[in-house]
Image (spheres, rainbow, N blue to C red):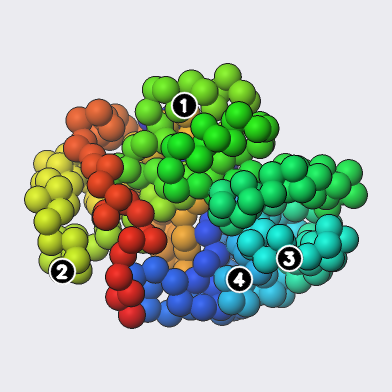
Amino acid sequence: MGEPSEYSRKLVIGTASWGQQYGLFNGSAANTFEARNILSLALNSGITSLDTAPSYGKSEEIIGECGIPNLRVFTKLESSWLDKSLESVYEDIRSSLGRLGVSCLTGLTFHSAGSFFRDSRRALSLVSGAIHEGLVSEWGVSVYKTEEVEMLLEITNPNYIQAPVSIVDRRFIGDDISKKMLENSVKLQARSVFLQGLILNGVGRLPDHFSRFRGLFGTYERIAESAGLSMLSLALMPILSQKSVQSVVVGIHDFSQLEELIDVMSFVGTGVDLESIPHCSDEDLVDPRRWPDFR
C-alpha cells in the first residue's frame, strides 16, 4: 500500500468535536490539553493539516491556544458571508487567523455549494481578494452531490472540492467525475470517511433509522474479519490509498484515536481492494442532511 508518510501527508485532522460534541458516537469534546497532545503526536507523525470552522464551537480558539507552529489550516466560510460586505468577510477571516494563531489559511472552504451559487460572481471576487490580501492560499467548496461539482466546473475551477467519500459512498471517485476534476486540476478532499461513525460502530449499534442497511454493514464486518482487519482499517485505507483522493479529513477527538489511526496507516500490506467491497448511493444513508436528529 505504500509508505506510512505518504498517508500521513494526505491526512487532515477534523476538529469539529474540539470544544463541542459532534457526530453520532462521540461522547465528549476535546479540550486544549487533549488537543495539544493530539497535535504534538500528529506533527511527530508527519500530519500537519487541520480542518476547522468558526461554527465548530471553540475549535479555532483551542487550536490557537495549543501554540503549535507550522500547521496547515483549512477553515469554512459560512453562508452568512452573503449578508456582509467583502471587507467585513475579510475581517472575519482575519479574526479566524488571530484565533488560530496562523498568518495565512491553507484553504478557505465555502461551507455549502448553495451559498456559492447564490452569488458566484461575488464569491469569486471574495476569494480573489482574500488570496491577493495574503489571507488565503487556496479555496474550495464543500458539496454533497456530484451535480454540484459539475455546476461548479461550468463556472470556475476551485483548488479543491470537499466531498463525502467512504467505502459506502463512492459517487465522487467514479471515473467520470474524477476525470473531470483531474482535467480541471481540481483536488478532491474527502470527508465523512466513516459516515459519522456508522461504519465503525457495527450493526449492533446501528440506529433503527438505518435498519434496511443492516445487511450492508454486516457484510463490511464479515469482510474485515475475513481479511484480519479492524473496521477502522477497512474503512480508511482503501479511501486513503485512492489516487483520485488528494487528502482525507478524519475527525479526531482524543489522543488514543489518533494513535490507533497512525497504527493503521503504518501497516504495509495489500489490504482489501475497494472494488471487492459493496457500496450504496442511497441518499437516505449517505446524506446526513436526511437523517433524523439522534440526540
Q: Closer to us: mark 1 or mark 3?
A: 3
Residue at the (64%, 62%) spot, across then down: 78
Which residue bears the numbered disc 1? Answer: 178
Residue type indicated by callout 4: Ser
Q: Closer to us: mark 3 or mark 2?
A: 3
Looking at the rendered structure, the secondary structure element under dot 3 is: helix
Depth order, front residue of 100/216: 216
Which residue bears the numbered disc 3? Answer: 83
Which residue bears the numbered disc 2? Answer: 208
Q: Along the horizontal axis of the image, is 23 left or right of 106? A: left
Residue 175 at x, y percent in the picture: 39, 22
Q: CA distance from mark 1 to mark 3?
A: 34 Å
Depth order, front residue of 40/81: 81
Residue at the (30%, 50%) spot, across then down: 283
Residue 137 at x, y percent in the picture: 77, 44
Q: CA distance from mark 3 to mark 2?
A: 39 Å
Q: CA distance from mark 1 to mark 2?
A: 34 Å
Depth order, front residue of 122/108: 122
Looking at the rendered structure, the secondary structure element under dot 4 is: loop
Residue 257 figure quarter? bottom left
